[in-house]
Amino acid sequence: MNILITGSKGFVGQNLIAELKNRKYEHIFEYHRETEPELLEEYCQKADFVFHLAGVNRPKDQAEFMDVNYGLTETLLEKMKKYNNKSPIVISSSTHAAFESSYGISKRASEDLLFDYSKQTGAIVHIYRFPNIFGKWCKPNYNSAVATFCHNIANGLPITVNDPSVEMSLIYIDDVVEELLQALNGKPTQAGEYCEVSTIHKITLGEIADLIYSFKNSREERSIPVLSDALTKKLYSTYLSYLPESQFSYELKMNVDSRGSFTEFIKTPDRGQVSINVSKPGITKGNHWHHTKNEKFLVVSGKGVIRFRKIDSEQVIEYFVSGDKLEVVDIPVGYTHNIENLGDTDLVTVMWANEYFDPKKPDTYYLEV
């Protein structure tokens, strides 16, 4: 299948092309501002499917709205007619097409061209009136508040929120691409005469700003957000894509003593805490028990033994562990426990607890195994 994509270097175009290549589509005609205009002739002759994504929404001159948004659409359809190419066409319009701004008028005029073209030729057209799209590779300080907030906050720059109560309708780029691929396969999500991305998120500008600031602060707090919320998960992924390349890494506070070290890695409000414990050869750590806090130990390097004793029993239970054989050991409540390094190298253990450590309520009681 030959797939023509106009606006191939734009935000949606880049993401769509990346996923098309992931799915082994090989014949992609990319058309953008730097493409030789003559190539559009060839592409319109050979295309089996068209994604018309090109357009402007922040021109220097208002006249560019019609010149580009309407003009390029008109040129595209004329060339398709010239070669009697009735391939399906998807166009990315905007919810602004319902309003009387210069941008909205140009988008609505382009939609009307498509509807007329379909009636004249019988070609299938799918018109998507997208609301605000966010995700990786979106240009900041252009037309996306999410992209601007992510970029500025990640880079330590200020943001401006004129009215935090303004509600935004957002769609995520991966959901957009998935919907466009459904259209490619003849299964668009139809909503009357238009098509739509079914997953739309509602959130205020103030809430977006607060969330993104919390992502920045999460490094210092050693936390991750509540990713069970779909929008939070998508926004967090988007934020990370705007990190400066010199700041992909961040340090953790290592609690070091003669026995080794203990370092908190990740804290979550609903999924507990992950820490890394390093024990020197011959060292035993632990000798405590919990009422409610439960843990999982995973030794990833070295060899040792994890010992348990029910607090009202004298029987000691031993589990020998090694980085050569990865296995998880559950630490039940009501059992005092410890871990001893039996090797001659550091014993490295990944430890998960069902709740993050609260110094005011540690639920940790010293008792020798």
Image: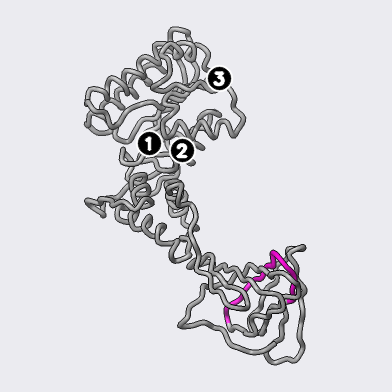
The kind of residue on which mark 3 rests is Asn
Instruction: Give the tally of numbered discs.
Output: 3
- Residue 35's quadrant in the figure? top left
Q: CA distance from mark 2 to mark 3?
A: 21 Å
Residue visible at 32% across and 47% down? Answer: 168
Mark 2 is on which residue type?
Val
- Provide residue 236's location: percent of width, then percent of height: 45, 52
Label 2 near label 1: C-beta < 8 Å?
A: yes
- Residue shown at 49% from the left, 41% from the top: 174
164 left or right of 122 in image: left
| SS label for mark 2 | helix
Q: Which mark is residue 130?
A: 1
Of the residues shown, which amino acid type is indicated by label 1? Phe
* Residue occupied by mark 3: 2
Image spot of residue 249 (x, y percent):
49, 55
Whether residue 166 sits left or right of residue 33 in the image: it is left
- The answer to whether residue 361 is above or below residue 147 is below
Give the extent of the magenta segment: 292-305
Residue wearing tag 2: 176
